[in-house]
Amino acid sequence: MGKVRISSIQLFLLLSGFLFGSTVILAPAKGAKNDAWLAILIGGACGVLLMGVYAAIALLNPSKTLVDILEEKLGKVAGTIVAILYVWYFIHLASLVFRDFGEFICSVTFPEMPMVVVIGLFAAVLLYAVNSGIEVVGRLSELLVPLIPVIMLIISLSLFTVHDFTAFLPILENGITPVLKTALSFITFPFGETVAFLMLFPHLNQKEKLKNVVLISAIVSTLMQVLIFFRDISVLGSGLMDRATFIPHLTSLIIPEFNIEPLVDINLLIGGGIKISVCLYAASRALCQIAGINDYRNLTGAISTFCVVLSIWVHESVLDLFSWTEKVWSYYSLPFQVFVPLLLLLLSLKKSKPSNAGTANEK
Amino acid sequence: MYGKIKKRSGIVRIAFLLMILLLLTGCWNNRDLTEINIVAGIGLDRTEDGKVLLTVQVVEPAAIQTVSSGKGKGGGAQPKPVFVESFEGETVFEAIRGILSIVDKRLFFSTAQVLILGERLLQKGMVEVLDFFQRENDINYGMNILVAKGVTPGEILEIENDMDSIPAVYIKETAENTVSRGTVKKTTLIDLIKDIDSGERQPAIGQITKAGDKEIRTEGVAVIKDEKLAGWLDPYETRGYMFAIGEVKSAIVNIPVDKGKIAMEIIRSKGKAKVRFENGEPSTLTIKVEVEANVGAYEGRGRLDSQDDLSILKEILKNEIKKEITQALEKAQKEYSSDIFGFGSYVHKYHPEYWKKVKKDWNDIFSKLPADIQVDVKVMRTGIIKSPVKKDE
């Protein structure tokens, strides 16, 4: 297992794909309406910091996965319990993305297809990818993730004629509070979710590039989100944007004369696929380490089946899913995304100071 | 041990390949072209007792082929390229499903080119019936919306003529021609929804009437206020309105000169509606229009070979356009009290505090504000010749 290596460019693409994930259909900052761009920028800035924390943890504990770090810093028992909670968190995250995907396909593309079939088929493909190894997922991301910005560019350019560039005005109509609230939820979705990458960072072949990779991918995806927001609001206007179920999809419907709406499906397949693969990998890898199983592939089948069932069972309807993601998800995620990592960072800093001070100076 | 794993993965592989077979059959609810009815035009109206009256114009692809290939050969009885059916329902969706009791195949709406609303529908408000068209996943948000004046949408859709075998396409193309002349507004579904959603601008929808047995005419707009029909603008007022919102692409404006008339061809135009504020209150509505025009035809006697001549034309054209805009604005203010120009949108964007207070009464405030209309005209070229034919006087 130690031999598994991914290059820095692969990690960059994996991270970017992960960050796009289901944001390609959900427009995470829609709560702030016209000021969403502000929320995205604030949330993005904090998200960059948060991902910096994850990178710092990984750098301070080289070649250790999240489970190793937890057990080392918190002790065997507490560490194992927290690690199990993390496994649950990754599974839950994967199942939410599955559900987003299923709801999207069933709402707009294949309205009469049972959702379990949509999700199940998707899960089968992803299971195959994850079982082939994280290197394969990395190489897949090299192949597929560059398509996301290309598709976005195609959609944005085809909409150039229907833009109303002042649609985002007025600024701060409802005050700063909704902006900050949305910014918080934007930190947790998608940036904080990259905590799953703590299971992947040890595989990076050039450790010194980790920080740059993390920072650049976070900045790139923030900027992309801002651009997408401006595109969506100038096409749809804030009223329709507020009412739309899947904003970017509706935007692509507006394109005059020709229909490239399936491209949004492709974006979701790529982004969501990478997100779920990473979560599945992280969950099964972590569970293996906890239980002392050699090969994580023994668990992927069970875990992905569980994810599929959970995704269908956990929410009653699409609105339930959305309101839950909007209201509960960010608070539910805070311990996993912020508190525990910060604690780990503090503990790592404390421990590494005396021994690593010399090496840090050399750099 | 190793061999066993290898054998197992072989089975998995075969199972996987077999699963792919399932996908190769195509989409879950695959419907071939022969199993759907392709809708070209939709009409919506209300019956006298308040039910939704849906009319659809459905294309028969096979018939279109025989019509076009049979031309000139004088073939016998041709099947009709389209058929029109109507159905009543409590809701739009009920009517759409209910119509299957008289129509053979399921309706396919993505191809719909026009949605024609009836006058009676607009008298009661149209927002309710539009919900279905936003929610359904195969509706084209770019389809044209028109309001039928003096006829029912059903009558419009039933018109057949030889210019295009699909009447809905004929309607759409005609409407688009008129848009470039500036006398009708092209309102797509998304435009209409945006206007209704924002509440900052009252929608104005292109108007369609019957002109004879076989033709339709799209000219003028229907002015909507609070989701109901408030009245109509005639073609000239419509053009003034289109100048003000900057949507005239090419239009012919006739201007009177000493000895005859000149048809000025508008090449480009830009328009912007703003509101001037004084002490936190709106004081004037300003409309700024920039127009580029060429001399299209000089039907009369006169000279046209110096900049001075053109300057005179410029002045006349300016006043002519100003007159049209003023007429449109006055009608919108005095008669209909409906802000179709989108001044409200400007107020909302740049004076959000004030907008919050007056949002509900904006149309009344709008009706009372004085207007400042500035038109900036450039006459660039005179075409192949300069002066018209000289005649002895």
Image (spheres, coloured by chain):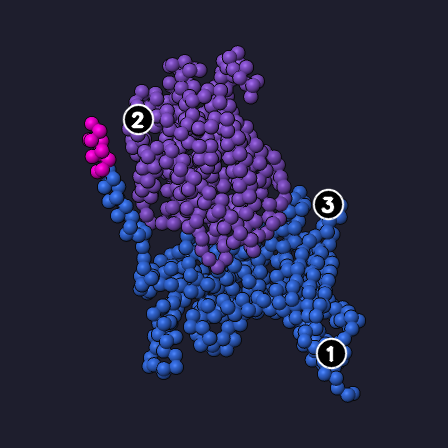
Chain colours: A purple, B blue
Q: Which residue is mark 1?
A: B387
Q: Are marks 3 and 1 on the same chain?
A: yes
The furthest residue to the top: A354
Mark 2 is on which residue type?
Asp
Residue tagged by mark 3? B280
Span colored in magenta = B1-11
Q: Nearer the viewer, residue B389 or B115?
A: B389
Q: Quadrant of the C terminus of chain A?
A: top right
Earlier-in-chain disc, 3 versus 1: 3
Instruction: Say whether residue B153 is left or right of residue A167.
Output: left
Overall secondary structure of the magenta stretch?
A: helix
Residue at 37% in and 71% down: B64
Quick check: A264 above or below B232? above
Q: Position of residue B321 (x, y in %)?
A: 70, 67
- Front tag of 3 and 2: 2
Q: Chain of mark 1?
A: B
Give neighbour class at mark 1: few <14, some 14-19, many 20+ (Cα, 10 Å): some
* Secondary structure of residue under mark 1: loop
Q: Is residue B2 magenta?
A: yes
User: Residue shown at 29%/31% (left/top)?
Assistant: A302
Amino acid type of the residue tagged 3 in the rendering? Gly
| Residue of label 2 | A295
- The type of residue carrying mark 1 is Ser
Horizontal and vertical percent for residue A114?
31, 45
Q: The residue tagged with tag 2: helix, strand or loop?
A: loop
Instruction: Give the side of residue B14 with respect to residue A220, left or right.
Output: left
Mark 2–mark 1 Cα distance, whole angstroms, equals 91 Å
